[in-house]
Image: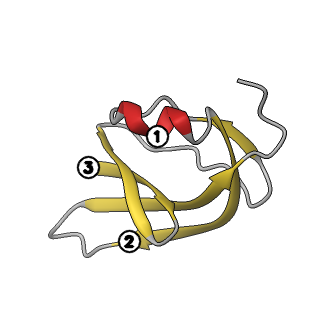
């Protein structure tokens, strides 16, 4: 089974990661720290607030589950 985590900001997927084990998804309103592979997003924030979470379960043939996090920078982030 493949597990995918996607982080979205302003409608764009800004981070995509794949894991071999299940993902424990944060809940709406939670504050998360993201270390982006694309270092340009560090200018926005290190800490993010989850505004919405979507879980996508594909058919067993694809053996993939995706968690999509729709986030905004934490306005209290002092970096």
Q: Nearer the viewer, mark 2 or mark 1?
A: 1
Instruction: Tell me which corner region of the image, top left, top right, bottom left or bottom right, holds residue 60.
Output: bottom left
The extreme top residue here reads 79
The answer to which of 58 and 12 lies nearer the viewer is 12
Q: Which residue is mark 1?
A: 41
Look at mark 2 in the image and give the residue it sits on.
57
Q: Position of residue 67 (x, y in %)?
A: 46, 59
| Apparent side of residue 13 relative to residue 11 in the rendered image (left or right) | left
Q: Position of residue 43 (x, y in %)?
A: 53, 35
Left or right of residue 57, residue 8 in this image: right
Tell me whether circle 1 and circle 3 mark residues in contact (CB < 8 Å): no
Q: From the viewer's perspective, is the residue at label 1 or at label 3 nearer?
A: 1
Q: Which residue is mark 3?
A: 2
Q: Nearer the viewer, residue 76 or 23?
A: 76
Q: Earlier in the sequence, mark 3 or mark 2?
A: 3
Instruction: Give whichever of discs 2 and 1 has the lower sequence position.
Output: 1
Q: Between marks 2 and 1, how big is the CA–CA gap?
A: 28 Å
User: In the image shown, does 43 or 56 lie closer to the viewer?
Assistant: 43
Q: Residue at x 46, y 72 (%)?
A: 11
Alpha carbons under labels 1 and 3: distance apart: 26 Å
Residue at screen point 42% across, 34% down: 36
Label 3: state its secondary structure: strand
């Amino acid at each position: 089974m493949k597990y995918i985590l996607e982080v979205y900001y302003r409608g764009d997927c800004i981070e995509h990661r794949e894991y071999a084990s299940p993902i424990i998804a944060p809940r709406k309103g939670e504050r998360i720290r993201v270390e982006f592979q694309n270092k340009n997003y560090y200018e926005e924030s290190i800490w993010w607030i989850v505004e919405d979470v979507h879980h996508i379960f594909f058919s067993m043939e694809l053996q993939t589950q995706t968690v999509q996090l729709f986030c905004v920078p934490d306005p209290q982030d002092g970096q």
